[in-house]
Amino acid sequence: MSTQPVPITRTFAGLSWAAARWSDFRGAARRGGRAVIGRFLLNISPTAWMGLDLLIVCIGTLIGQRVFVWWHADVSVLADYRLWLTSTALGCAVVLAGQMFGLYEHKALWSSLRIVARSLLTILFAMLATAVILRVFLYSDISRRTAAFTIVFYLVCATGVRLLAHRAVLRVRRGLLLVGHGSGTSMLLRAIQHGRLEGYRLCGIVSDDPRRHGHTIRGVPVLGGVEHLERMLARHDIEEVVVADRGERSACYERAAMICLRHGCRLTNEATFYETAFGEVPVAHISPKWFFSADLRGQREEHAALKRVCDVAVSLTGLLITLPLWPAMILLIRMQDGGPAFYAQRRVGLRGTTFRLIKFRTMTLNAERGGCVWAADNDPRVTRIGRWLRRTRLDELPQLWNVLRGDMSMVGPRPERPDIVEPLSRLIPHYQERHLVKPGVTGWAQIRYRYGASVADARRKLQFDLYYIKHMSLELDLLILLRTVGTFLLGAR
């Protein structure tokens, strides 16, 4: 039997096809590897990033001191207490400044501009604070050469590592599948389509309605019914499944949920997924049973007692530090129009009780002669001095006295006026539940959302307030206080 030679063109075509497939395989493996690394980086605790910054600062300070401060070269590293003092002070200052400017938030890794800007602010503020602390309290100093080298070393190393992490994180696209459809699903779809949810790849929707199969809902394809679920999970590499609220009461969707769990998918309902992903509670899509399972920490006596101790300590410290500024602010306000420097208002506090909140006056005299009005951008009732006080948030300093008295806490939902609370309670479900804890000078809503001036803004801020009430802890309070200081330094939003 004779064999026909294979044409040379067919051989080259086969080799070209194999080379192309090998290139595709290597590219897919490389992308998949970056995605795995990206997932790992997104799951790293902020404490690990803090430890990395601390290590980089210590190494930078050590190298800078040894290379540029040659007159200390004869002193051993272990015996040079000034070196360790400087490294420790600067390292702690970097960690605190990073908290202030949001450097350790996972969302910071999604933007290279955010990484560079926050790293620069962190090291510059930390260096300034360290210089002041060493000079004023420890009677020591840091060499300008060492300081300059440490700043450059930190920016190159810490920022470089984060930019490499940013490249890996951009590859992360977890496969997301929605089981069922309802009003909560529409809200979730809008958030994803507006780019508010990074790191997910929305693959489609599972529906028990055959008429929807092959169609789209808000541009997202309906892939089929529960009978096709196993095939969908494998084909689209699904990692996370969100079950609609309506689906939780359906036997069909309950069976689908069990299938997803057996395939190793992370399974949540709409409210839980939204709460975890966005740091807020979808108030229009929760029922009273949400409060039954929330296990609100603010109701625990031991937590309330410890929070009160921290409130007294922080408010006393704040009053002592800022008291020298008060005479100047009082003088400026009185020079504006001759009116009083302070302004007191009735506000709603814990469990609906009212108290008198004290602030520096920022509006003209008799500004609310016609009744209560929402504050707006460029409000003509705000004085020139008042506009500056509001922008820097110095107008809220007298509230430290309210905290000391026990009317307020340092961190909590912002207190509103009774004539605003009453209509909002009728328009927004669960609005009164924000009074389950003491109101605060600052809060989760204040660092996550702009100044509220409408019912829609009040509803959105309530979602952040409910998240805080559920997750409140001293650690979260400290994070909010540090971010508030960062907002103050950068200018209030």
Image (tube, rainbow, N blue to C red):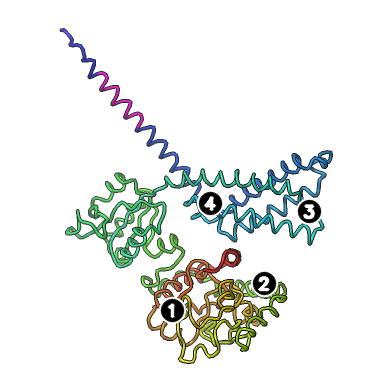
Q: Mark 4 points at which residue?
A: 115
Q: Name the residue under label 1.
A: 431
Tell me which segment is drawn in magenta: 11-23
* Element at label 1: helix
Q: Name the residue under label 2.
A: 314
CA–CA distance in space, label 2 to label 3:
28 Å
| Residue 187 point in image, percent of width and height | 34, 65
Q: Mark 3 points at which residue?
A: 141
Instruction: Compare residues 125 and 55 and report the one nearer the observer.
Output: 125
Callout 2, which amino acid?
Val
| 51 on left or right of 256 | right
* Element at label 4: helix
Q: In this view, does 417 lie above or below 89?
A: below
Nearest to the eye among marks 2 and 3: give it. 3
Nearest to the eye among marks 1 and 3: give it. 3
Q: In this view, does 188 lie above or below 119?
A: below
